[in-house]
Amino acid sequence: MFVKPSRRRRVAAAAALGLLLAGCAKNAPQDTFDPAGSNARSIDDLQRPVFYVAGVVGIIVFAVVGYAIWKFKDRGQDIPEQSHGNPKLEIALTILPAIILAAICVPTVSQVFSLDKKDNNCVINVTGQQWWWEYDYAKGSECGGVVIPESIVTSAELVIPANTDVLLRITSRDVIHSFWIPRLNGKRDAVPGRLHTLRLQADQPGLYTGQCTEFCGLSHARMRQAAIALNTADFQTWVTNQTEAYTAPEAGTAAAVGQSTFIAQCSRCHQVNGLQDGDGKPVLAEPDLYVLSGAAPNLTNLLTRTAFAGWTFDLLTDECRDTLWNAPPDEFGALYLKGVTAECFNEANLREWIRNAPAMKPMYTDPKNLGSTGGKTRGMPALGLTEAQIDEIIAYLLERK
Ligand SMILES: [Cu+2]
C-alpha cells in the first residue's frame, strides 16, 4: 500500500510520542508526580491546580497569538488603521493576572513556610562531596520512637523509619551539590559552609531513589542516593546492627588476613568502627590527609547496604536487587535487613572497584594531576593491589555486617 511520505512521518511521530509517554509511565522510580510521603504530597497537591490554571492561560495565549498570526498575515493588504491605547482593556489585563498571581501566591507562600518547619526529634546530618553522600545520625535523636544510642555514620543509603518526619541538615565538603529524593520531597542545595534543612517522610516501607541534582563535576551523574524506609521494629533492628560492638575475625581465617591487608591498604582513608591493630591500638582513618573533600565513606557495615560509590554500583546481583525493589511494603524490611547474603553478593562489582576504582567512576585521580590539589585525590585512587590481596579484603568485608 502506498502511504504519502508526510502521512508516514506523522504516523512515525505519533508512534514515537506514544512510546515516549509509555516509557514515562512505566518503571519511573523517580517520579515527582507520584508522591510517596506527606511532604511530597503537599507539593503535588499545590502544583496540580497551579498547573491546570497555568495550562488554561497558556492555551488561551497560544490560541490568540495563533489567531492573530493567521488573521493579520501579510497578504499584500493595506496597512490597517493605527490605534493607540485602550484603557479598559489595559486595566483589565493588569488586574486579572494580578488576581491569578495573588491566588497562587497565598497557598504557595504558606506551603513554603509549612515545609520549612524544623521542630523534629529525628535529626540526620547529610554531607555531600565529590561524589557521594554521607549520613550521620545524631546521637540522642529519637526517630519514630527509636533512640539513636551513638552516632551512626554511613553512606549511599539513608535509612529512615517509615511514617515519621525526619529532619536532614544538609551541607557540603567541597562544591555545591543538591539532595533530591523526588517521591519524598523537593530538592535542597548542599552548600559548603551553610546548613540547609529538608524534611523527609515516607508513608510505607520501601526504597526511594534519588540523585544529586546540581552539576558537581566529572562524576556528577554517578552521585546517586536512596532512602530506605523501614517500619519501627525493623528500624530498631537496623540501629542495633549498626551500633553493635566490633568483633575481630577469628585468627587464622582468610578474613583475619584481610583485616591486616585492610589496615595496611584502606584504613588511612576508610574508618571501620572498633578496628584495632595488632597492639590493640584503635585504627583511625585520616582521609583529610589524602582526599580533597577530607572524607571517605565509613565502611563499618558496608554489606548492609545494597549499592556503593554514590549508590551507583550494585552490591546485590540483578535478580536479588529486583526482588528487593519489587518487594511489597510488609516484606521489604525483612528482606533489606538480610543485607548482602552470599548468594546475592555481586562480587564482580566490588572486586573491580577495589582493583581500579577510577576505571568505574572517573575521579581525576590521575597521579600526574595531583599537583594542584597538594597530592590529595578526588575520590578513590587505584591502589595497585594483587588479586590475592583483593580476595583477602573481600573475605574481611563479607564478615562485616
Ligand atoms: Cu553532587
Image (spheres, helix red, strand yellow):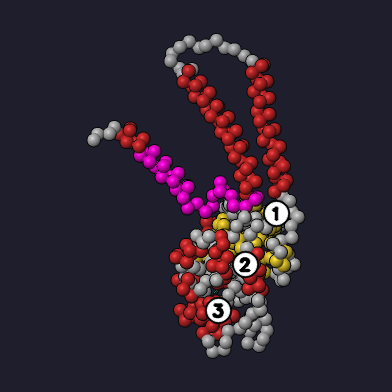
Residue 29 shown left or right of residue 374 in the figure: left
Residue 399's disc number: 3
Of residues 183 and 152, which is closer to you in this image?
183
C-alpha span from label 1 to label 3: 37 Å
Q: Amino acid at mark 2?
A: Asp
Residue wearing tag 2: 234
Q: Quadrant of the C terminus?
A: bottom right
Q: Is residue 104 above or below residue 164?
A: above
- Residue 286 located left or right of residue 65: right
321 part of magenta stretch = no
Please report the bounds of the magenta region as a residue range: 12-39
Q: CA distance from mark 3 to mark 2?
A: 21 Å
Q: Amino acid at mark 3?
A: Glu
Residue 235: assigned label: none
Q: Is residue 294 left or right of residue 336?
A: right
Q: Residues within 10 Å of mark 3 (few under 14, many from 20)?
A: some
Was residue 33 drawn as part of the magenta stretch in this picture? yes
